Each structure stands twice: as structure tokens, then as C-alpha cells.
Amino acid sequence: QVQLVESGGGLVQAGGSLRLSCAASGIIFSSYTMGWYRQAPGKQRELVAHITSGGDTTYADSVKGRFTISRDNAENKIVLQMNSLKPEDTAVYYCNAARWRDRYWGQGTQVSVSS
């Protein structure tokens, strides 16, 4: 059974930082592209960042220079370090694992940024 469990969300003031973690089980973690997506109220889910099995990273333009994604294949975990947070970063953040046609989602964690 595949499980992606997010943690680290919360409420922070604009300019602050949060660190999201996603622990994966039930998959060959090192072979998956791992990513973070977010969905704000009334908006579509969007890619925030992802990291391939080889360690290549991609970021949404809106978070470049502020967010950093990393992975630890020994611990089957990814981390999203979010700095200089803005109110527009407020959303539910979802962990994602993708490989070929396989795609898995976590339950999501709320990030709220106050102005």
C-alpha cells in the first residue's frame, strides 16, 4: 500500500518560513519523481516544485528563489523549504510521486500566510 504523509504546514506571517516534509512508503522511492503541488480555494491544483530520481529540480516561476525542494533516498523523504512566504502562497500543499503511469498523492497539508 502506497502512503505519502505530509507534515509541517501551519500559519505564518508574510516573510516567514516553513518546512514541509513528505514521507513515502510502499514505493521504490528512488525511482520516482517526487513533487509538491498546491491548491488554493477556487483555483486549480498547480505544480510548485519537483525533483527527479536523478536529482534534477523544477520550480514554478512564482516560487523560484524562495522555495527549495530536496530528497533523501535513504529515508524515503522529500522536503520543501519555503522562505520569504507571501499571502499568495496560502494553499493546501500536496506531495506527489510519479513514475511512468503511476501517480500517487498525499492527503495534503494547509499552509496559511497572513499579511
Image (cartoon, rainbow, N blue to C red):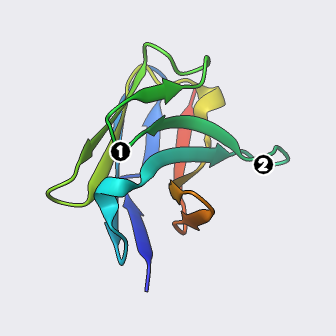
Q: Amino acid under label 1?
A: Ser
Q: Which mark is residue 53?
A: 1
Disc 2 vs disc 1: Cβ atoms closer than 8 Å?
no
- The numbered disc on residue 40 is none
Image quadrant in which the C terminus is located = top right
Q: Mark 2 points at which residue?
A: 41
Q: What element carries label 2?
A: loop
> Of the residues shown, which amino acid type is indicated by label 2?
Pro
Is 50 situated above or below 101?
Answer: above
Residue 113 placement (x, y as % from top left): 54, 35
Q: Is 68 or 97 nearer to us in this picture?
A: 97
Q: Which of 59 and 32 is in front in this view?
A: 32
Question: How far across and how far down the image is residue 92, in percent?
Answer: 60, 52
Q: Residue at x 59, y 63 (%)?
A: 103
Q: As displayed, is residue 101 above or below residue 25?
A: above
Number of numbered labels in the structure image? 2
SS assignment at label 1: loop
The x, y position of residue 34, in whole percent, is: 44, 49
Horizontal arrangement in the rendering, residue 41 relative to residue 33 (left or right): right
Q: Which of marks 2 and 1 is nearer the N terminus?
A: 2
